[in-house]
Image: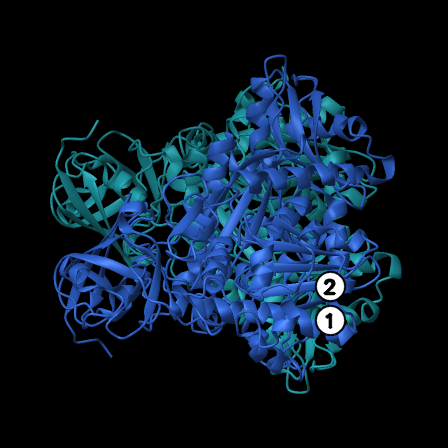
Chain colours: A cyan, B blue
Amino acid sequence: MKTQSPRYTVRFSVEGGGEREIPVPEGVSILEAAKLAGAALDAPCGGNGTCGKCRVRLLSGTAGGSRSRQIPPEDYEEGWRLACASPVRSDLSVLIPGAAGAYQSRMKVTALDEGRERESFAAFLRELKGLGFTGDSGIETLTLTLKAPDLEDPAADRERLLRVLAEAAGVPEETAGCVSIGLYALRKLPRVLRESDFSCTCVIRREEGGGLRVLDVFPAGSAAAPPVLAALAVDIGTTTVAAVLLDLTTGEILASGSSGNGQIRYGADVISRIIESARPGGLERLRGALTGECLAPLIAGLCAAAGLMPEQIYRAAAAANTTMTHLFAGVSAEHLRLEPYVPAFFEGRGFRASELGIAVHPDAELILAPAIGSYVGGDITAGVFSSMIFRKEEFSLFIDLGTNGELVFGNKDFLLACACSAGPAFEGGEISCGMRAADGAVEACEIDRETMECALSVIGGGKPAGLCGSGLIDLIGELFRCGIINPRGKFIREGERIRRDPWGAASYTAARAEETENGRDLALTETDIDSFIRAKGAIFSAVRTMLAIVDFSVDAIGAVYIAGGIGSGINVEKAIRIGMFPRLPAEKYHYIGNTSLSGACAMAGSRKAAEKIAGLGRGITYLELSSHPGYMDEFVAACFLPHTNGDLFL
Amino acid sequence: MKTQSPRYTVRFSVEGGGEREIPVPEGVSILEAAKLAGAALDAPCGGNGTCGKCRVRLLSGTAGGSRSRQIPPEDYEEGWRLACASPVRSDLSVLIPGAAGAYQSRMKVTALDEGRERESFAAFLRELKGLGFTGDSGIETLTLTLKAPDLEDPAADRERLLRVLAEAAGVPEETAGCVSIGLYALRKLPRVLRESDFSCTCVIRREEGGGLRVLDVFPAGSAAAPPVLAALAVDIGTTTVAAVLLDLTTGEILASGSSGNGQIRYGADVISRIIESARPGGLERLRGALTGECLAPLIAGLCAAAGLMPEQIYRAAAAANTTMTHLFAGVSAEHLRLEPYVPAFFEGRGFRASELGIAVHPDAELILAPAIGSYVGGDITAGVFSSMIFRKEEFSLFIDLGTNGELVFGNKDFLLACACSAGPAFEGGEISCGMRAADGAVEACEIDRETMECALSVIGGGKPAGLCGSGLIDLIGELFRCGIINPRGKFIREGERIRRDPWGAASYTAARAEETENGRDLALTETDIDSFIRAKGAIFSAVRTMLAIVDFSVDAIGAVYIAGGIGSGINVEKAIRIGMFPRLPAEKYHYIGNTSLSGACAMAGSRKAAEKIAGLGRGITYLELSSHPGYMDEFVAACFLPHTNGDLFL
């Protein structure tokens, strides 16, 4: 049926770059129009008007809908609207505020952009080298000088190269037939040979069966620098995608970057994405939102930063949770959320990056970190590798605080994993003033018990822009310590920094408008605190349940490794005090950053590392917490500050 | 610089289907506009106004240029123009006549559409079976029943399949790690397993190293028919592309078809194509004209005819001359025409059909028949295989009459190959009334010496539409026998059937307008006869020169195999009488059809056949005729009917 409603044109101007225009029928929301136009708006609540993140500003035209409580009257006057709650009623011109704007409706872009994160990543790469998990990607260069052709010897370029290649590469006689030249290299070969007087540097990949494939050719000769051989590692988070380019020869990082996962406009959590993927064309839409809108520009940016052609990326690896891995591969994720919760695949080997829509070298292999279950994915196997707990005698606990929370407990003899629905609070998601641990994020704070005034510590040293996970822990810990909130997270004191809106909901202003980067109050609401309490309760109760299942006491834990986007500034004492982590000496806790990314980096650079991670995927035992009878009681008991059983935190 | 000339819109209506519109600046030719609009017009002369093939009809608007001698005044009045000689002077509406129209400016579409061709193809397939060159494609089906998952056993679908696959397929323990599931199959797997109660039929490919790859999965069970496993074979001619779908299980042909090579708008011969390929973007334009415009619809048509999904084509092979092979692979062909005439590659193994832009199963291998030199390509190695001369004790001569002429001479102990520039006359190219051997083609004729009246034999039995190669030989042979033309091909008698145009050029009307399919005279001009004489002279002189080089007499030839689009109706006696073939008993001559296609078909169906053809590529010795001192004299001597040395044909 053809729609009879009038059609209007909505023009989106993205602050700091770019315009898009889209014709839409009357009545669709501005959020929907933005999706159709391919403009990424952050709408973690899925567009139901509750999160207040999809704020845009009307520059001209008329939109329907009434004022939402998330938009103050003066801002409403200036044209600010919730995109999800504003149906199109005329031709519109709409501003999408930039990341540094008053409202942060666009997704944040960060990655290894915090000095300490970068340092810990570099330290990990050095550790890999020491353990021999490096330099064995199979990608090498080989420089050859060929005899130039003449009328007596008119052999083709390919056959001329092959005449000397097998011997030069030390390929044994019996596998010499397995020497091949890929189409990409073949297409370059005639020009390269004639540019360089028939001397060329081949990029080869030694195949596992003993064969060899020529991936690329470059002119050789005295003036020619050896080509850089790069590998790509990607962490595909539900919220954020982070990537690094690795130099396969030196083992150094060539470039790093990150981007919001474009799928976020289909919902903040994996369940929303799975539901979207099951709609007609949904799988392709989600794949496009990830690969086309997010990975393609991210990889292009990394290559530009490193001064490389994308085709110089000869190997790639990605780590992600099970849902993201399926959606990235274009494989149905529907059955992940239906009993008996069976993924389509655990291991993803033997894919080419190009068939997954990644524009690197067309022959580049892309290895997916293996999943263990529907809710413990490749990000965890990669993370366990990075934590190195599988090599240790002592019992360790690995905690990944991503959009979900995952735990792994064990040592070199056994490893158990489980997942809990912590939500994205630790990454700044579903927190009104939340953000990832990047410049401008409050990572620590202290409150004066008397005055209730607040001192903030901001990553990068500038004005505060939002709270990252560690800042959130600190702030809630301080509010609780100072008796400003009660164990249920409700405000019980009054003061200049405590505000109550007309509906009675209270908030604490951590930084006043004039002190913040965006000129608006940085305030934590009771709703935010509630989100956080449920998140920390999920983690704590999962630790308790897992230990109970295997009959270990908390004291048996020799070390706790914290991974994820919570930020390196995490104050473990405060996290323990509010009941997020078990009571253990602070020195047992280690923040190890984005281990999904560092694990992917290990896989990209080393076959041995990829093999080990595959082995971890097969060796870790998965515990299904939700079906465990004690878990729900533990969770309810943990949804207090610090816990209904305060003795646990003495 | 921005062009200042006015822009006009040219609308092309293709007779029998389709319209295209393109804006162009004033003054570009209608031929150029048609190229830009992607409408294929046959212009073998490259658009210089000499061949007269690019006739179109102006329906409205004004074009420049004066009347060409190829357009009679009454047709000019009706709006007929040579597209190449008519610059756009206003908005235009232009009719491109259909294949059956009065003027045949569009390319012909034919293939195995002649009963005898089809029969000889089927006979060849039976012979392959007898020789064991069949059934070893490595593609098989395997039906498995899996245990359904439950909460106790939530292994992923992929891992569940792999648990039973290696054993069921008889893959030995040590290569069990080489069992893989391709992305295409993986994407189907969750749905297929749940549709069929976890019973599925896998399409597997046994890899040469002992591994195994799952290419596809289908629901199994009592109601499910086993899936058809198809292979694609393509002959990429300079003028025509022919293809067949082969059933890998039964060895039968599922469908066949052909299409004009869309590259023809960049020139009729390989040199024009190479020149175009060297222009900016030229290689991609030529690739697109072949794969996008020609192969894609051809394959879609074959699949529709056979009731298959294109993804059910699990293996493919193509044979073509060296230039076409390079352009198909997107590899520069520039050096083919520059001394020392060195191709970029001889052998093309290990490509995936998908990376060559062929939309079949994304994991399908596409094997290119190996070339021997710049002017003896994979069509010839495939053809030599089909002729089976490499298995014989007796000395055989293989002649492929395509757009070029290629010869191979030898037996099971040695084989020599050479090429000569015969031009496309034998396929109906550069002949005003020429066409391929398909329904409507005159394949034989007889002329009454007294009355000069003509009796025609038409393929399919209907009205004549044009002359195919065998008809051309017959007609010229008869004109010569009856003393109507002299040894130089000039008309020396007068009569009702002989017409002379105002410029003095004569023609013979083989069929009058009222007798032909298209209602126009079917006439052979002196220019046509001249083209033919040069073509047959090239073939004959090449045979003589090659035999002289190896010091063999004509009588040493035990058998002659004629391949190519000349038509099965070839009258060898007449061909010998006009000096095209050496004087040998007629029973030594065998017409074996399109051996490039039948050889490709063998490669598509059998690894052993592909291996043998690769071996032929390495084993055949290439002779460069053009550098041989005696060749030019032989050619000049052969450009008479029958020859300057008439004794050769006694």
Mark nearest the camera among 1 and 2 is: 1
Callouts 1 and 2 close, C-beta under 8 Å: yes
Q: Where is residue A601, by image quadrant?
A: bottom right
Residue B420 pos. (x, y %): 59, 70
**Residue A90 horizontal side relative to residue A245, left or right:** left
Residue wearing tag 1:
B547
Residue wearing tag 2:
B409
Residue A118 visible to the viewer: no
Q: Amino acid at mark 2?
A: Phe
Outermost residue on the front side: it is B450
Q: Amino acid at mark 1?
A: Leu
Q: Where is residue A540, by image quadrant?
A: top right
Residue B270 pos. (x, y %): 50, 68
Residue at 59 percent across and 13 percent down: it is: B223
Q: For the residue carrying disc 2, how many other residues have a C-alpha within 10 Å: few (<14), some (14-19), or many (20+)? A: many
**Residue A215 horizontal side relative to residue A280, left or right:** right
**Residue B594 horizontal side relative to residue A91, left or right:** right
Outermost residue on the top side: it is B222
Chain of the residue under the numbered disc 1 shown in the image = B
Chain of the residue under the numbered disc 2 shown in the image = B
Q: For the residue carrying disc 1, how many other residues have a C-alpha within 10 Å: few (<14), some (14-19), or many (20+)? A: some
**Mark positioned earlier in the residue sequence (1 or 2):** 2
Residue at 68 percent across and 75 percent down: it is: B545
Q: CA distance from mark 1 to mark 2?
A: 8 Å
Residue B562 pos. (x, y %): 63, 55
Would you place residue A545 above or below residue A286 in this image? above
Secondary structure under the numbered disc 2 in the rendered image: strand
